Image (tube, helix red, strand yellow):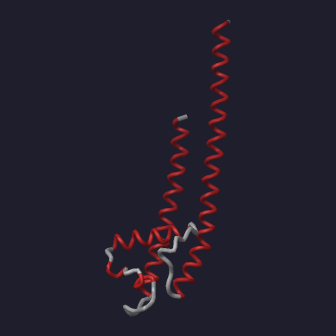
Amino acid sequence: MVQIKIMYAFRIFRLVTTILILAYFIGTLFFCLSKHTTYEEDDFTFYNEYGMRDLTDIENLIRMIYFAITTLTTIGFGDFNPKSEVERIATTLILLAGVCCFSFIMNQLMEIVIDYRHVTAENQQSEDLSRWLGLVCHFN
């Protein structure tokens, strides 16, 4: 039973890792798009509006992964949003891709939960049968 739990925990870990990798690449691509469509310091873009020029690389990375996760999951708190038309088009594409990806990931997660419940139910029945047979053998 421990091996089965480890197997399902590993499958969930893979899904979470997939989400984080996807968010990393989407955030990095959006950062590059925003940075390279900013030509002057007074352009109204994501890069200028949120002061990303003044932040360290780690702070920019954290901010972009946060933006990517809130966009991919379609939560969109509104604290970071696209400013230019090019960024809005890119965000629309990210939203469409996010719905597809997260639907697939949630489907995989539900399959894991259903499989786990099925396997544990079978193991519980076999344990009950073993106890009953042990009780019968005890009285024989």
Q: Residue at x 50, y 71 (%)?
A: 68
Q: Is residue 53 above or below residue 13?
A: below
Along the line of sight, which residue is nearer the eye, 137 or 99?
99
Q: Residue furthest top?
A: 140
Q: Is residue 70 above or below residue 2?
A: below
Q: Quadrant of residue 124?
A: top right
Q: Residue at x 63, y 61 (%)?
A: 104
Q: Residue at x 68, y 12 (%)?
A: 136
Residue 1, percent across and down?
55, 34
State which quarter of the image contains the C terminus: top right
Relative to 21, is 130 on the left or the right? right
Q: Quadrant of residue 62?
A: bottom left
Residue 65, percent across and down?
45, 69
Q: Is residue 94 above or below residue 104?
A: below
Q: How many marks?
A: 0
Q: Residue at x 59, y 77 (%)?
A: 93
Residue 132, percent across and down?
67, 18
Along the line of sight, which residue is nearer the eye, 10 or 70?
70
Residue 126, percent across and down?
65, 27
Q: Is residue 75 above or below residue 31?
A: above
